[in-house]
Structure formats: structure tokens, C-alpha cells
Image (tube, coloured by chain):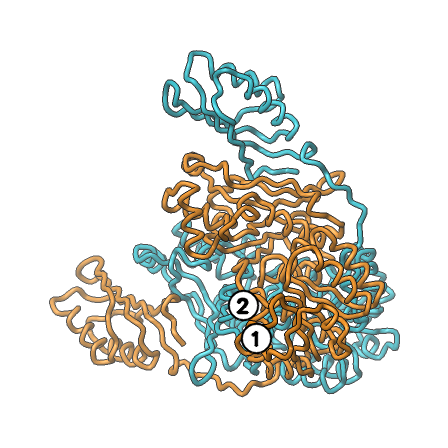
Chain colours: A cyan, B orange
Amino acid sequence: MRIGLLGCGTVGQAFARMIAEQGETITRASGRRLALGRILVRDAVRTRDGIDPALLTTDPQAVLGDPNVDLIVEVMGGIDPTSALLRQALEAGLPVVTANKQLLSRHGAELLELAAAAGTELRFEASACAAIPVIKVLRESLLAAEISAVTGIVNGTTNYILTEMTRSGLSYADALRQAQQLGYAEADPTEDVDGADAAAKMAILSSIAFHTNVRFDDVPYEGIGSIHAQDIELARDLGFVVKLLGVARLAEGGISVRVHPALVPERHRLAAVMGPDNAVLLESGTVREIMLVGPGAGGTETASAILADVLSILGTAKGSFLQNALVDAGRPLLGPEQTSSAFYVRLDVQDRPGVLAQIATVFADAGLSIRSVIQRGEGDGAQLVLVTHVGSEARMTAALAAMRILDEVRDEPVLLRLLAEAAT
Amino acid sequence: MRIGLLGCGTVGQAFARMIAEQGETITRASGRRLALGRILVRDAVRTRDGIDPALLTTDPQAVLGDPNVDLIVEVMGGIDPTSALLRQALEAGLPVVTANKQLLSRHGAELLELAAAAGTELRFEASACAAIPVIKVLRESLLAAEISAVTGIVNGTTNYILTEMTRSGLSYADALRQAQQLGYAEADPTEDVDGADAAAKMAILSSIAFHTNVRFDDVPYEGIGSIHAQDIELARDLGFVVKLLGVARLAEGGISVRVHPALVPERHRLAAVMGPDNAVLLESGTVREIMLVGPGAGGTETASAILADVLSILGTAKGSFLQNALVDAGRPLLGPEQTSSAFYVRLDVQDRPGVLAQIATVFADAGLSIRSVIQRGEGDGAQLVLVTHVGSEARMTAALAAMRILDEVRDEPVLLRLLAEAAT
């Protein structure tokens, strides 16, 4: 299975690395071996790590016309000439995977029709929210779920800026500068901060959710440039946080799709989505609310979504690639005694002089290091709460056994584990 | 396409309703018409709303042996005789969709092997977390993403109980009783509160995530019965909330899968998952963290996951059902003037006597009702912040136009919309 790659920037190179590194998993799951065929680039002289220079070409027809190319992956972006190239590929019956939200949100319906007419497939998971599989979930899992609303934080740049304005009281300009320094905003952030990027994604998502052709031009959008630190502060006083939302709703008489900054109640699940993360909340009478959260951008994240689309096309073509998903990879299961975590232990103790020393000795003998101790109450009703650093279950089991036989320990100790430091 | 239904309880009846109500969408998307064939029940005399009594039978062979049945949906539950019936169906080459976590977590690998050998499919999205499409996402979207950890709140009953203990300081017994009254816990809640239900789901999810056969018996589990209100209070003092977690990790030397109550840092994203909701956090080097949240139980929620599996099987068989997902359903797009929401308006005003009355008149004339007003500062630097009840964009546009020409209003008003009441 040879892939013709249109474009070889950050995402394209991440994709090339991924199919090389994941070759075995891909073959086991799909029964096919994926390889790169020709690669369209602007500059065929510059070398790219791990990519055979002989595959590079500056001629699109060398990729599209190569009889060994079975599938096109488009990561070059833009509308022209990309649109014409994808049309040509689909008309020739080649399946196409694209990450191009500009193109999809303007000409998605025509391209899907072309694909259907040619009996081939067009997939575009990476065009909205990178590796968050919201398009697959809408197209497949919730196809018949009658979606009533899609509400999303679909632009990481603006969510980062608003989060920092909220958390640190920064001005818009300072938060934007910080986002640029950290790589969360581009040198020219216009598309992101004015809402156009979010509008393109909402056009794509609402088209799928509502089985209706919603184009970029149909989506009115507002950005976050007019939001002042004082609005964020006032919103907080009123019990809200400010987010740039894409809001698509099924209403009486039709569909409404918009992008605008909004006050979100601080206990709403979208209010908890921080920094550069994206989140999409899907509402439906049959499934109530399902939310997907994750990174909405990034090279490997986007490449992962592209690879998933490629695998879905292989699976669809083969009929049953999923059978192979649960093959035994030969990984042994570790018993509890082989795992570790930090522990919380609550003991009902008799508060006598020396009891803490005794318990501390038990932990020390078991080789468990104590991070904090709280003592509550006095006399017979006293309690000791110990939180340990990460240690093995075997050590904790030994410590528990030793504590149980102490006269000062009444009742069975309560043992909980801490998530944060749970390193197997 | 005739479906043989094994079992017709809450989920089975919801599924029957759904394929009747969603018939048009299903046919448009898959090119096939779904209908119920024979239905296995315990009591064929009792009538069920909207189901033809002639389809009911108490004889499993009447379903499995019916030459018109193309696909089996199993919602009868249990291990025996269900296991034998599904084996028989798969061996006969019938695709099977099941919601049966007990069976899958004990015999999933054998059933998948049977399906592969017979060239047919076994799907089981509904067996873990109902309509949250975590199995599809793991099997398809993240197949090559090298998952390193799956951490889940996969039991709604216990999450409801722990949430109420945290929020209202209830004892375990009182919170359990409340959960039973509200239908979040069964009369016999043992499977849920002792962690067995979560362990079955984690066996299924970790098998898919790590391409390894993890069975129910491989998953050590602890429940929440020993958690006291004081542990929840102590945890809070330490900066944590208590959750029942399924934790599956790829570690050096193998895989560790466990279910136990855990202290989750209060700012962690799993800490925000409240009430009967489920959530699964998927970690991977390539896609960082993706979280899926939603209702983990319920009749229509589970039926929706089953229908999605059925549609995936139809799509796989046909090769391209997804082409049809973006057909124009003929829904018109509403312009902004046809939408409504509650509004936040911040005005820089000159603080003269009567300015509030003037602004209030503008809102009244536009037909917008004011919910709250905040005035900040004095003199030239004063600000008015008004929050309205839900009203149309057209009215807000009129009010803005009227405000702009007032001498007392300096600069452009800042307009934000409120999410919560955004109707339309």
C-alpha cells in the first residue's frame, strides 16, 4: 500500500516517522504494509530526516500519476492548487486523507460527492481538533443519535490566551505574546484570534453532526481581541469564565452555527478546559452529553489522526481489519505486588506516647518513605493519616501486616492510593 | 437486513424503538433497511410496546436458525447460555453485536478468534461505558498511537455515591440509599460498589488498548465500601478528591491493570467528573491525553452504542457507508438575527445622574429584559455591566445601535453571550 504524500512539513514528517515506527502494528491490524510512495515538496533538494530523497518531487503529477500510489495524504494546506489536486485524485478513484480545514470547510460537500461518485473515500479527521476523534465519533458512533447541539472550544491558541488572562490577570496583548513565545500562537495569529480558524472547524463539525452542508461562509464569527482583563474579572464576579466557543444548534426552523466569546458558568464542564486544550461537547436526546477533550494541534497529534483515517480506509477496503486489533502482543500482566504507588493510610489508634514512633518504625522497616502525617483527635478516638512517597505494593502489604498486630491500632487500616504518582 | 435480537429488556426495547424511529437516517447512511427478525425472550406472552408479538420466541434456535436473520444483537446478559449462543452465531458466520461485559471480559479473546476464523465480526462498544465510544476510539482512532495508560471512572453508581459523600458530607450508607432511590444504584448494588463491574470494563478496555488478552480474573479490584466520610474530608484537606479508578498502565516488563479507590488531585481532569458520569483518560506519547466523558449507563445510551456497532458492520460490509453521512438533510441555516441568547454588555459611561435610567430605557425599548446590573467606578471612568435574560440577536443589535448614539456611552460597548441560556 503506497501513499502519495502531498506536502512534507511538520505534520508530513511526523506522519512519515509514524508509519515507519508503527509498521508492525499497522501490518498486524490491517494485514497491509504501508509505505511512502512519491512525496510532493516545494524544495526537493533539502534533505528530511528518515525520508529517502529519491521519493521527493516538485511535480504534483509525479505523485498523482504514479501507478504505484494507492492512497493520497494531503498535508500541504491551502485552497489552490490543493483543491484541483484532490479533485483529480478522487476522480481517479484514489482514496484521499486530508488535514485541510480551509479546503474542507469551503468545498467539503463537493469533494465528498466526487468521492462517492468515484466509489472511493475522503477522510478528514485531522482537519478539526487534531487527534481528538470527534469526526469519527460523529460520523460513525453518533450517526443515528440525533445530535441537537455541538459546542466546542476548538481553537487552542485562544483558549490558552483566555486561560492565562483568567489565571494570571494578564492583558490580552501580554497573554498573546506569552502564547507566541511558547509556540501556542503563530507569528501572525490573525486566523486564530479572530475566530476564523474556529469557524472553519465548526463548519466541518456541524456539517457532519446535522447531515447538512455548512460552509465556512455560513458561520458568523467573532474573535477575542475585544476582551479586556476587566471583562474576565467581571465575568468571574458573576460566576462565569470567558471562553471562545463554537456553538452549533438544531433549532426550530433550522440550524444555527456561530463562533463567539461566551460566558460559561464556572461549574460547566467546558469551563474546566484549560490552556491549549480543545474540547467538543455533543448533545443528543439519546446519549445526553458526551464530551471529548484533548490537544487540538501538534505535529504528531495531527499525524496520528491522519494515520487513523488511513487505517480506516484500509479496514473498510479489507472488510475486517478490526478483528486483528486484539491480538496478543505478548505483554505479561504484572501482579499487584509488582506495582507501586503513593499511599494514603488512615489508622484508628490509641493516642499513647510513642504511638507515632511505633508506626513510623513500621513504615521505615518496610522501606516506605513518609511524605506527611496528620494526627486528629485524642485518646481512644485518635486517628493517624499517613501519606507515603511512591513505594511498592509488596512493601505496603508488609507494613499493613505489621500494623495490624500492634495493640495501639484499632480496626482495619484504611488504604487508598494516590493517582498522581501511580507509576505502575 | 434482519436483526435477530437475543433479549428484550430495557436496552432491547430501546434498540427496537431506535431502529424504528431512525429508519430513514439509517437507510440514507448505510443504504440498507434495518428490521427486527426473531426476538428471544423469556416470556413470549407479555406484550412489549411497538414490537410485533409474532416476532417473539422462547426458543434460541428459532432466532439463530432463522435463514432471514443477518446479524445478532445480544442484550440478554449472563455467561450461560449466552456464551454458547454467541459461539454458535459466530461459527455460522453471523456478525454479532453485544453489550455483555461479563461475557466479553471472560471470553472475549476466544469469541474474537471465532469471529476472525469465520470471517465475520464481533463488536461490543456497549459493553463498556454505554454510548461513550471509547472502544471504537481505541480500536480505530488510536490503534497505532501506542497507548501508555488508560485511567477511567467507569462505574457511574460509585461515582455518584462518592460525589454525594464529597458534596453533601453523606455517609456511604446514606449516599448509597440516595443512589438507589434515584435509580443510579440497583437493589443489589454489590457488583458496582465492590469494583467488579469496573474490573470487567477495565479488562475489556486494557485488552484493546494494549493489544493483549486481559481477562476479568486478571484484574484485582477493591470497592468503595470501606471509604468513610472522614477519608473524603481528610483527602480534601490534602488537596484531593476520592474516586473509584480503573488504572491500566504499560510498564517496564508488562501491563498492570487494577481497580481501586484513589486520591485524585483536585485540579486533575478526572476530579471534575461528577455524579453518575463516566470518563476515560487515554495517554499516549503521540497524542498526549485524550479524555472521553459521558453517561456510562442507561437504556437509550446503551442502545445507541449497539446501533453504532450495527452501522459499523453494515459500513464495513458495504465498503463505504460513510460517504452518505454528509447528505444534505435539507435543514436551512439560520442567520444570526434568528438566534437568541442571554447577553453580557459592558459600557464605559460618564457617570451622570440618569445614565442608568437612559440605558435601561434603551433595553426596554428593544424588548430586552435585564437580569442584573453592576456599576463600577465613578465619573468619566465609570462602567455599567448589564446581563440580560434570553432575547434575540435582532433586539440586541437594535439596543447596541441605540446605545452607540448616547453621549454618555464612551467607546464601543463590549458584547458577550452567555452559554447556559443560549437557546437556538
- Where's residue A386, x and y in %? 50, 27
Query: On the picture, is B80 further left or further right than A388?
Result: right
Say if mark 2 contacts mark 1, CB within 8 Å. Answer: yes
Give the chain of mark 2. B
Label number found at residue B300: 2
Task: Give the farthest residue toward the front.
Answer: B45
Q: Is residue A334 above or below residue B208?
A: above
Residue A84, how many percent across, how many down? 71, 83
* Residue drawn at point x = 41 percent, y = 80 percent: B336
Left or right, residue B413 beside residue A71: left
Q: At label 2, which amino acid type do we have?
A: Thr
Q: Earlier in the sequence, mark 2 or mark 1?
A: 1
Query: Where residue A300 sits: x, y (%)?
Result: 68, 57
B15 relative position to A309: left or right: left
Residue farthest along the left direction in this orientation = B353
| Residue A114 position within the rendered picture, expressed as x and y whole percent measured from the top left | 71, 85
Residue at 30%, 80% (x, y): give it: B395
In this view, the residue in front, B158 or A202, is B158
Q: How many marks?
A: 2
Classify mark 2: residues with Cα within 10 Å, few (<14), some (14-19) or many (20+).
many
| Numbered badge on residue B18 | 1
Asked which quadrant contains residue B258, the reply is: top right
Q: Amino acid at mark 1?
A: Met
Query: Vertically, is A415 above or below B70?
Result: above
Q: Visible in this render: residue A4?
A: no
Q: Give the vertical position of B298 relative to B339 (above or below).
A: above
Image quarter for residue B14?
Answer: bottom right
Question: Can I make out residue A57 in this image?
Answer: yes
